[in-house]
Image: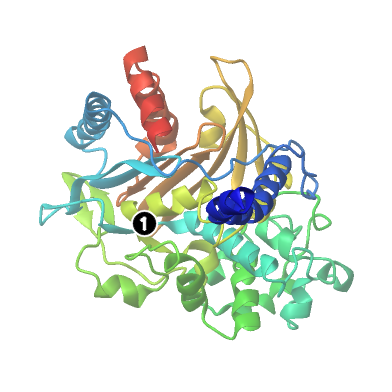
C-alpha cells in the first residue's frame, strides 16, 4: 500500500520525464546530425576551364558595427579624397558605396548633379553605370541556369535562329558562356557601332556573317558589346518578357534596389538623376541623357544609385542566397579566359599579377604586399553617355567598393585601389577598435 502511494505520488513526474525524453532524444539526434554535416568536407562544384580557382565567401554575420571614431575617420578620409578632386575640377559629381560583409559602411555623394544648377549628389542619386551592367547580365543568366531553363553551354543559334557568323561551323559552336566571356572568336568590339546606332539585337544577330572570325570560340578574349548583349536577347526569348522587366523581377525587387532600372523612360521619370557632362574651356557643360545601350541592356543599360549598388555588392559577397546560390555565383566569377597585355588601366594597379574574364566580370589577381599571397578581385568598369563607373569585390576581405561619376575623368582609373587602401587603413586601426568590432560580432 505504501509502495502504491509512493508510485502514485511520483507517477506524474515519471510521465513528464518520459515526455521530455521522447521530445529531447530526436532533437539531440538532429543536432548531432547537423554538427556532423558542419564538419563534413563537401565536394567542390564543377568549374569551367578555370586557370586559378578561389573559394567564394559564404554569407556573413548580419552586421558589422564600426566604432564612432572609426566611422568618422572613414567619412573624413573619403570626403577629403573627393573634395580634392572637386577643388581641382577633375569631376562634376560622384557617388560612393562601400560594404563590408552584410553592412553598408559608407554611402554618400559629392559635387553636383548638374554643374549649372549646383544641385548636390547624394547616395540616392541615379547614374547610368555603362558596362558595369555586364555583371548584372552574368548574374541574371546564372539565375536562369539555376532554374534549369538555360545552360551555360547552350548554343546561341538554338535560341536565336537567325544568328550567323561567316562560317556555319563556327556559328554552331558559339555558346552562352562564350558570349558572356567575350570569347566568341570575333574581332574586338564587333558591331558596337550598330548597338550605338540603336539597331535591335535580332537585326544585329543576323549580320555577324559580315564579320570574319579571327579564332575558334573559347580560344581568345576580345571585348564585345553586340555579341555580349545577345545573352539578354536569349533571356527575353525564354521568358517572353522584356529584359528590363526580367531584371526588375529577378534582381532589383528581391534585393530592394528601389531606384534601379534598365530603361531610358525610368531615368526620365526620376527627379534625382545626375546629368552627364562634357568638359569645356572654363569648366563643365551638362549634356542630355541619350538612349544608347537601352537596346542592349545586358551590355550597358542599367541605371542605379550608390545605395542600390551597395545592396548589389552585399548580394555579391554571398548574401541573399535566395536570389542566387553561392555555387552558381562561383560559376559566374570563374575565370574563363586570360586577358593579356599591360595597357589596361587596372593592370597598373599596385601588386597587379594577372587578369581573366569570367561571365560578365573581370577577375584579377593581385599580390598582397602584407601577406605575399595572391588576392582575388572581382571587378568591372563602365562608361556610357559621359558617365563613368567602377565596381570591385574583394572576396577574401568581404569588401565591396563602387564609385559612380557623371563626367569623364582620369580619377576613375585608380579610384578603386585608392579607396581600398583607405578602407584597409581604417579597418586595420589600433587594437582597441579591433576588439570593439570583435565584441560586436560576438554579440550578434
Image point (55%, 71%), residue name: 194
**Residue sticking out furthest to the front:** 1
Question: Percent from the top left, x then y, of residue 424?
Answer: 41, 24
Image point (73%, 67%), residue name: 211
Image point (54%, 45%), residue name: 59
Question: Percent from the top left, x then y, of residue 426?
Answer: 34, 23
Residue 140 appears left or right of 420 = right
Residue 111 appears left or right of 20 = left
Q: Which residue is mark 1?
A: 308
Residue 391 appears left or right of 42 = left
Q: Is residue 222 visible?
A: no
**Residue sticking out furthest to the left:** 117
Q: Nearer the viewer, residue 85 or 38?
A: 38
Counting the numbered discs, the total is: 1
Task: Tell me how the rendering is colored.
Answer: rainbow
Label 1: state its secondary structure. Answer: helix
Q: Nearer the viewer, residue 216 or 415?
A: 415
Question: Percent from the top left, x then y, of residue 72?
Answer: 21, 28
In terms of image quadrants, where is residue 179?
A: bottom right
Q: Is residue 318 visible?
A: yes
Quarter the C terminus occupies: top left
Say few, some or many: other residues with alpha carbon within 10 Å of mark 1 (under 14 / 14 to 19 / 20 or more). Answer: many
Question: Percent from the top left, x then y, of residue 86?
Answer: 20, 37
**Residue sticking out furthest to the right:** 169
Relative to 249, say whether 303 is above or below. above
Amino acid at each position: 500500500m505504501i509502495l502504491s502511494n509512493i508510485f502514485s505520488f511520483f507517477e506524474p513526474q515519471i510521465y513528464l520525464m518520459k515526455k521530455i525524453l521522447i521530445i529531447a532524444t530526436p532533437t539531440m539526434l538532429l543536432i548531432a546530425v547537423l554538427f556532423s554535416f558542419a564538419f563534413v568536407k563537401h565536394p567542390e562544384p564543377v568549374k569551367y576551364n578555370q586557370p586559378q580557382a578561389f573559394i567564394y565567401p559564404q554569407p556573413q554575420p548580419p552586421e558589422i558595427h564600426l566604432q564612432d571614431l572609426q566611422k568618422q575617420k572613414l567619412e573624413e578620409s573619403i570626403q577629403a579624397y573627393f573634395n580634392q578632386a572637386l577643388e581641382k575640377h577633375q569631376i562634376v559629381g560622384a557617388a560612393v558605396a562601400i560594404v563590408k560583409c552584410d553592412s553598408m559602411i559608407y554611402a554618400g555623394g559629392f559635387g553636383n548633379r548638374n554643374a549649372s544648377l549646383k544641385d548636390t549628389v547624394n547616395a540616392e542619386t541615379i547614374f547610368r553605370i555603362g558596362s558595369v551592367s555586364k555583371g548584372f547580365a552574368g548574374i541574371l543568366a546564372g539565375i536562369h541556369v539555376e532554374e534549369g531553363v538555360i545552360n551555360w553551354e547552350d548554343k546561341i543559334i538554338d535560341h536565336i535562329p537567325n544568328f550567323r557568323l561567316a562560317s556555319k561551323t563556327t556559328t554552331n559552336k558559339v555558346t552562352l558562356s562564350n558570349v558572356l566571356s567575350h570569347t566568341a572568336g570575333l574581332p574586338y568590339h564587333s558591331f558596337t557601332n550598330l548597338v550605338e546606332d540603336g539597331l535591335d539585337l535580332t537585326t544585329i544577330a543576323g549580320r555577324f556573317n559580315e564579320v570574319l572570325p579571327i579564332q575558334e570560340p573559347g580560344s581568345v578574349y576580345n571585348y564585345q558589346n553586340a555579341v555580349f548583349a545577345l545573352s539578354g536577347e536569349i533571356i527575353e526569348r525564354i521568358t517572353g518578357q522584356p529584359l528590363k522587366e526580367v531584371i526588375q523581377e529577378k534582381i532589383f525587387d528581391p534585393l530592394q534596389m528601389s531606384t534601379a532600372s534598365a530603361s531610358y523612360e525610368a531615368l526620365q521619370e526620376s527627379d534625382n538623376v545626375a546629368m552627364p557632362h562634357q568638359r569645356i574651356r572654363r569648366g563643365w557643360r551638362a549634356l542630355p541623357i541619350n538612349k544608347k545601350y537601352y537596346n542592349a541592356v545586358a551590355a550597358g543599360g542599367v541605371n542605379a544609385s550608390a545605395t542600390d549598388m551597395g545592396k548589389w555588392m552585399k548580394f555579391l559577397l554571398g548574401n541573399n542566397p535566395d536570389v542566387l546560390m553561392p555555387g552558381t555565383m562561383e560559376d559566374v566569377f570563374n575565370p574563363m579566359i586570360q586577358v593579356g597585355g599591360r595597357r589596361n588601366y587596372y593592370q597598373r594597379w599596385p601588386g597587379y599579377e594577372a587578369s581573366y574574364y569570367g561571365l560578365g566580370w573581370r577577375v584579377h589577381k593581385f599580390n598582397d604586399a602584407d601577406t605575399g599571397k595572391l588576392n582575388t578581385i572581382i571587378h568591372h568598369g563602365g562608361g556610357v553617355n559621359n558617365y563613368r563607373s567602377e565596381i570591385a569585390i574583394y572576396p577574401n576581405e568581404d569588401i565591396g567598393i563602387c564609385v559612380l561619376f557623371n563626367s569623364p575623368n582620369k580619377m576613375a582609373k585608380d579610384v578603386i585601389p585608392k579607396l581600398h587602401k583607405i578602407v584597409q587603413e581604417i579597418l586595420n586601426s589600433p587594437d582597441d577598435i579591433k576588439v570593439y568590432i570583435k565584441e560586436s560580432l560576438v554579440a550578434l
